[in-house]
Image (spheres, helix red, strand yellow):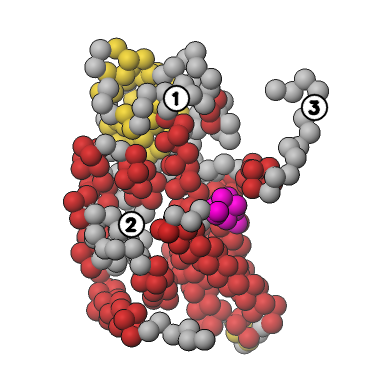
Amino acid sequence: MDLSDGPVYEAFRAEVRAFIAANRHLAPVAGGPRDERARAWQRLLISQGYTARTIPKAYGGAGEAPDLLKSRILADEFAAARVSPGLGGQGINMLVPTLLAMGTEEQKRQFIAPTLSGEMIWCQGYSEPGAGSDLANLRTAGVLQGDHWVVNGQKIWTSTAHLADWCFCLVRTEPDAPKHKGISFLLFRMDTPGIEIRPLVDMTMQANFNEVFFTDVKVPAHQIVGRRGEGWMVANVILKNERNSLADPNIAQARLNGIAELMKSETVDGVRFIDQPQYLDRLMRLQARVMAMQYNDLRLVSAELNGTGGTELAGMIVKMQGTELRHEIEALGIDVMGERGLGFGAHPYLQDAGAWQVHYMYYLGLIIGGGTNQIQKNIISERGLGMPKEPRAAGAA
């Protein structure tokens, strides 16, 4: 059995390595969605065909043909070099593939290119105080008046709302329809009159989440994706993309590579962590889980490209396993740093700008967010494995 890449892919791997070596000084080290360095890096990667690979050039992508091996090589090399593979976020990872599948031609041309380049930042208006894991219970209402929807209600846990230019939002437009069938998927600017944003400080001590209130917000009637009242179908495409984006195995590999480097430099009583069996065992266990997630990701992508299906259960596990894996990866990094791993904020001995601590708390939050992992386990057992539903108390809804 020949497991080598073959000459074409070996040449591509050499090309990617040469690009990273020549340009890694241009890559962003950190920074938010408004960071111009990150945007410039994104534009360079698109021009090389290294990100947004299969999105048509007409919509701002690289226009490359799908190629699983090249995608795998790109992921491997950027992770090994610990260099940013490009921008992500709710717009790029969640909305863009949804618009490609379900948007009008006008919507594709208006939104995809500026989103890919980082010029247009999005937030997601889904969860509400009474509609979290039971998202279809949402009550934010939209009433069609002439050529505008008039929206009233509230969203919560809205990531990056304070930075976003646009929002994709679930709104109940058919109040008399069954709850899953009365929802529409609207797009609107975040500077529209009637929108109020209130920050929520999370466990990282940053205001990454927000409450968003809508009071008579006017949204042009054509800014709807899919048909009126059929937004739940669009929402499920988004949720699938969200679950996948919350648990990217390639980013997990890059973080794991960072831990391996830490373990080579950090010592206890003069012995490197990489030479201590109990820590090496933890590292190897995490490596095996990251590899398993990478192969599962390849299975999902391959099935989608080939139209073979049969991967429903493989897709259901991604969010749950991926977020728990990232939390454990960050925990190992903190443990390896010893007492410095307890540092936070302005601690004088903080390492890597506190990234390990921030990600540790952030992924603890994501185990809850995006559909709690407890709910995910029910979905996997009932819908994926065909197990009976858990018993409900008499009289429970």
Dot 3 or dot 2, earlier in sequence = 2
Decide: few, some or many residues near mark 2? Use Cα within 10 Å; few <14, some 14-19, many ≥20.
many
Decide: few, some or many residues near mark 3? Use Cα within 10 Å; few <14, some 14-19, many ≥20.
few
Q: Is residue 292 left or right of residue 66?
A: right
Q: Is residue 14 above or below residue 62?
A: below
Residue placed under numbered mark 2 in the picture: 87
Residue placed under numbered mark 1 in the picture: 183
Residue 237 part of the magenta segment: no
Please report the bounds of the magenta region as a residue range.
310-321
Q: Nearer the viewer, mark 1 or mark 2?
A: 1
Residue placed under numbered mark 3 in the picture: 393
Mark 3 and mark 2: Cα distance apart in space: 46 Å
Q: Which quadrant of the rendered structure holds the C terminus?
A: top right
* Residue shown at 74% from the left, 23% from the top: 396
- Residue 348 visible at all: no
Viewer-side residue, 199 vs 128: 128
* Residue shown at 44% from the left, 48% from the top: 241
* Residue shown at 31% from the left, 81% from the top: 8
- Residue 168 visible at all: yes
Q: Is residue 318 left or right of residue 147?
A: right
* Percent of width and height locating residue 270: 62, 87
Residue 316 part of the magenta segment: yes
